[in-house]
Image (cartoon, rainbow, N blue to C red):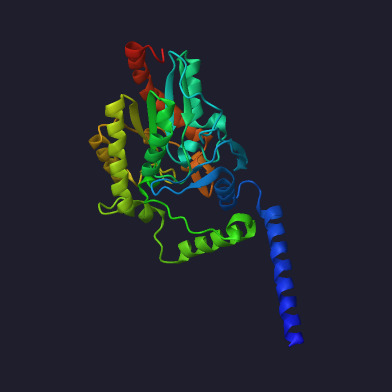
Amino acid sequence: MKSALKNIVLVAVVLVVCGLLLEAMTRLFVDDGMTYELEMWKYATQVKERDFRPDMGHKHGANRSASLMSVPVRTEAHGFRGPAIGEQAAPGVARIAFVGDSTTMGWGVAEQDTFAHLVIDKLARQGRKVDGFNEGVGNWNTAQELTNFKDTGMKMKPDIVVLTYFINDGEPMPTYPKESWLDLHSAAWIVLNYRLDSLIRQFGPRPDWRHYYRNLYRDDAPGWQATQKALGEFGQIAKSTGIKIIVFHLPELRELEPYPFQDVTDKVKKAVDAAGLPFVDLLPTVEKMDPSSLWVTVPDPHPNSKADAAFTDGMIKQLLPVLDDLCRTQQKGC
């Protein structure tokens, strides 16, 4: 009996030592500041927080900071990425809200290189009186973006909303399984789980990214149905408040010419048109470029600073007439 107990203790000690060594090696040699799964884990644990409302799920915590994909990320008191902003713009200043997911938040892009920052900066350099805030949060869909905008964004009294639409915005509400101690604290565990999942996706029956995205837009897909409803509510907000809401479509950057999801873009445009909102496709701003030159990293096709710069030019072209109208009618943004 004593011998058996001794063996159990010995095995337990060996497993613990091996686990600690694996964790140390992961943090020393794998965690280089650019490993996608580890950076997403840091984002989830250091910047995000759970919001238990069924139509929210998660959001940015207030006054958080972290280094993600080797760039600093900070949030202010409302969870917006960037510096603190007053509850109301100064007289004569047109306020622009940027609403979206990780592509708007600027995953892997320095704050000053995100299109949310560049649009405001370039307009200000042209002499326009503008300010703005970045309400983008990773892994949000359009319904979550709507909930947060009604809860927080509208309180900031924006005059214009740049509502960005990316193809995964048609996803249903995320699920939030209960997290274990390892999920919260072990880098090695995160890497192991991610690599196993990648193998399953590569060799298992799960659909590839093309089929995955297209399946989101079946007429009976619950995420797409919720997305259309959310777009409709954004349209109602624009009508009832006078806020100028423009939907900018951001292309999926793996393949650009020919673009494999034009049918999905057309479907989204139809829903945006039905909501009474302007729809602007930003694919033409990047379609002649090498797709991989627009990615944060080769395995991570989030838009990088080059893509954001191209999107910025496309956005400003559409925003200038809106600012001209605000200047004429409300003496803002002149």
Q: Is residue 2 above or below residue 278?
A: below
Residue 308 locus on image (x, y percent): 48, 33
Q: Nearer the viewer, residue 155 or 265?
A: 155
Q: Is residue 148 left or right of residue 109?
A: left
Q: Is residue 281 above or below residue 41?
A: above
Q: Nearer the viewer, residue 243 or 312?
A: 243
Residue at 29%, 53% (x, y): give it.
221
Which of the image's four quarters has the N terminus? bottom right
Which of the image's four quarters has the C terminus? top left
**Residue 252 in sight here:** yes
Q: Is residue 261 above or below residue 95?
A: below
Q: Is residue 122 left or right of residue 145?
A: right
Residue 71 locus on image (x, y percent): 61, 38
The quarter of the picture where residue 296 lies is: top right
Q: Nearer the viewer, residue 313 or 275?
A: 275
Query: Which residue, as the protein is rendered here, is positioned at the far bottom?
Result: 1
Q: Is residue 82 left or right of residue 3?
A: left
Residue 205 locus on image (x, y percent): 41, 66
Residue at 44%, 66% (x, y): give it.
204
Query: Which residue, as the protein is rendered here, is positioned at the far left?
Result: 274
Q: Count the marks: how many?
A: 0
Q: Is residue 214 left or right of residue 14?
A: left
**Residue 314 in sight here:** no
Residue at 45%, 28% (x, y): give it.
312
Residue 235 locus on image (x, y percent): 28, 33
